[in-house]
Amino acid sequence: MGPKRAELLEKNLGIKTYYDLLYHFPTHYLDRRSIYRIIDFSGEDMPSVQVKGKFVSFTVQGEGAKTRLVGLFSDGSAVMEVVWFQRIKGIRQTYHTATEYIVFGKPTWFNGKWSMVHPEIDPPGAALARTGFRGVYPLTEQLRNRGFSSRTFSAAVSDILSGISGRLTETLPQEIITRHRLMGIHEALLAIHNPQTNEQLQAAKLRLKFEELFYLQLNIQRYARRRNSTTQGFLFPRIGHFFNTFYSQFLPFPLTGAQKRVIKEIRADMATGRQMNRLLQGDVGSGKTLVALLCMLIALDNSTQACLMAPTEILATQHFETISQLVAPMGINVKLLTGSTRKKAREEIHSQLMDGSLHILIGTHAVIEDNVRFRNLGFIVIDEQHRFGVAQRARLWTKNIIPPHVLVMTATPIPRTLAMTVYGDLDVSVIDELPPGRKPVQTLLRYDEDRFKTYQGIGRQLRLGRQVYIVYPLIKENEKLDLKSLEEGYETIRETFRDYKVAFVHGQMKPVEKDYQMGLFASGEANILVATTVIEVGVNVPNATTMLIENSERFGLSQLHQLRGRVGRGEGQSYCILMTKRKIAKDTRRRLELMTATTDGFAIAEADMQMRGPGDIEGTMQSGIPLDLHIANLATDGQIVQLARDTACDVLDADPDLTHPNHAVLVAQLRMLTARLQDWSRIS
C-alpha cells in the first residue's frame, strides 16, 4: 500500500504493521459456493447471494445528490436492477454489456422489482469469485468512502502470506499444540482469512482463540504467583477485643453461613504474612458491608488502621452512617472524608490519622490524595471497585511501607469467565445467601396502558405507610428517544399522589440539594422519591417496598438488577414494576421477561453478558493486558477460557520461571504482547 492508504489504516484501525493486518480478522463470512437464480429470489430478508449473468443496459437517473447509475442485469431466468450512488463515472467505464460477470450482494424488493445496491462484481474466472467463504472485515465509514472494502483486506493478507518464504514461526510450544490438537499458526492465519470449508474455519478459530486467551491467562497467573511469593504483607495473628466485643454484643443480626465462610477465608489470608488481594462478590443486600466491618476490626485488633473507599459521596456517607452507628458503643473513632469535607474537619482527620487515634477512615477518592497519610494503614476496603480506575486504587498502596491487605467488593455479580480474566489474579469470595427474613422482590412487567392500575397498586402501598421509588432514565425531555422526562414525571406524580410528599433527585443537582432531598426520603418525611439512576447504589431505606422503573426497555439487565436491589431491604413484601411500551424489540422483551423470572444476580449477569458481550469492563486489566481481544469472546468462549487457564497453570506448575528451552517461545510472545503496556501487576 502507498503511504496515504497506510496512514488511513493506522488512523482508523490502528493497523501499522504486517502483524496488525494479519490479526485484523473478519467478523463474519459470506458463502460464495453457490450461484443463485434471480427467479428464485423470495422473502423480505434475503441473504447476500451471487448471480452469474450479463448487463443488458446502463442508464444514469436522477439529478444532483440523487444521481444514480442503474444497470439491468439478466441471468436468463429474470432481470434485476444493479444500482450505484457513488463513483458513477468510473463504474460506467469499468463494466460493459454482453460481458459475463458474477454479481454478489444483498437483493431487496423495491418498486416491484429486485435490486442490488453497490454489489461486488467479478468476471467468472476471477480467483476471488471462486472463493468458498469470503471474510467480511470491520471497516470505518471513512475507509469505505476512500475505496477500502473486505476485498482490499483479503488481497492484502493474501499478498503478505504468499510473500513469506517458508512458514510463519510457531507461537505456541509444540507440546501444547499436540495435546489440544490445535492447528499450526501458519495454517490458522491462512484459514481465518480465506477458509475453504466450514471445518477448516472452525479449527482456525479454535487455535487463534485459545492462543489469545492462553497468553492472557499465562500473564495473569505468572504475575499473581510472583506477587504471592514476593510481596510481604501484614501478619494479623490476633482476634481480640474489637472483633470479639462487636461479635458478641453489637452484631445487628446473626451472620449467614456464607458470611461466616467468607470471613474465615479473609482471616486465613491475613494470617499468612502475605498481602491479601481478595474480590468479594455479593448480591445487593447480602451483607458485604458487615463482613468488611468485621475484617476491619481484625485490623484494629492488630494495631493498624483501616480505610474504606467508595465511588460517590452518597455511598461513602451511607457507609459512614451505618458503620459509625454500629461501633459507636465501643469507642471506635470513625471519620468521613469527601470532596465536601470542610477545611477544619480535614485538618482534624489528617492529625488523627498521623497520631493513630483515628481507627477507620471512610471516604471517596479524596482518601487517595497525597496529603492523606496514615500512621499504620493495614486494611483497605474498596466498594463498587469497578467505578475506580486501576491507577486510583494503586495510590492506596503508597499509604504504608508494608502493603495493606486489600478487599475489593462489588454488588455487580460477575460471570465466571469474566472473573477468571478481569480479576484472574485476585482470590474470589462469594456471599451467595441473603439474610434470613428477606423476601424475594416480585418483579412485574407492565405496559403504558396499565398505568392507572399500576398507580392504584402504588397507592395501596403508600396507604400501608410504605415508601416508593420512581426511576426515570433522563433528566430533560429527549424527543428523539421518546422518553419520559424526570421533570414531567415529577409533576405528574405530585398531581397523582397529592396527599403524599414527593422528593426529587438527579445527578446534576448540587451535592447539598441532593443530600437534602435524599434525606427527606431516608428519614421517611417524603413518601415518594422520583429519581434517575443516581440511586442505583448507596441508598438503603428498608421501608421502601415498591420501585417503578419508567422506560425500562432503555436499561441493561445489570442496571435493572442494581436498581431493584434498592427495595426488598426490609421484612415486608417488595415489588419492582418494569414499565414499558407494548411494542418493543424481541430481544428487549426477552431481557425484561428474564428480570421477572429470577432475582439471581449471577444468572442475570451471565445472561447480560451473553446478550451484550463483556463490554469495557475494566479500562486496564489487573495484570497488564487490556481486555482488547481480537477474536475470543468472553461471553461465548467460556470453555476455551477454562482450557486456556488450566493449560497456563499446568505450564507454571512445571516451570514457574519459564526457563525450560521449550518455553522460550512463551517468554518471547509475552514480551511482545506486554512491551507497550504499563505494569499494573502490583495492584488490586
Image (cartoon, helix red, strand yellow):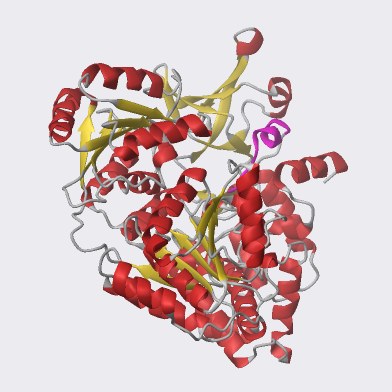
Quarter of image, res 327: bottom left
Placement of 497 over or under 33, stated as above or below: above
When asked about the image quadrant of residue 583, the answer is top left
Q: Is residue 625 left or right of residue 427?
A: right
Tell me which residue sits at (46%, 44%) in the image: 314
Q: Position of residue 189 (x, y in %)?
A: 64, 64
Q: Nearer the viewer, residue 66 or 336?
A: 336
In this picture, residue 193 sits left or right of residue 463: right
In the picture, measured across the screen, residue 486 lies left or right of residue 510, that is left
- Image quarter for residue 191? bottom right
Q: Residue furthest right?
A: 3
At x 41%, y 47%, the residue is: 537
Viewer-side residue, 17 vs 436: 436
Can I make out residue 411 in this image? no
- Compared with residue 221, is residue 191 higher up or lower down, i.e. above or below? above
x and y, in percent, of residue 249 in the image: 30, 71
- Residue 7 in sight here: yes
Task: Find out whether residue 145 is within the magenta segment.
Answer: yes
Q: Which residues are magenta?
A: 136-146
Counting from the top left corner in percent of width and height, residue 410 is at 45, 59
Q: Is residue 218 above or below residue 358?
A: below
Q: Residue at x 57, y 33 (%)?
A: 119
- Whether residue 171 is in magenta: the answer is no
Q: Nearer the viewer, residue 321 or 235?
A: 321
For image coordinates 76% across by 42% down, the residue present is 11
Q: Position of residue 664 (x, y in %)?
A: 74, 84
Q: How many marks?
A: 0
Quadrant position of the C terminus in the picture? bottom right
In the depicted structure, whether residue 140 falls above or below residue 502: below
356 with respect to 420 (left or right): right
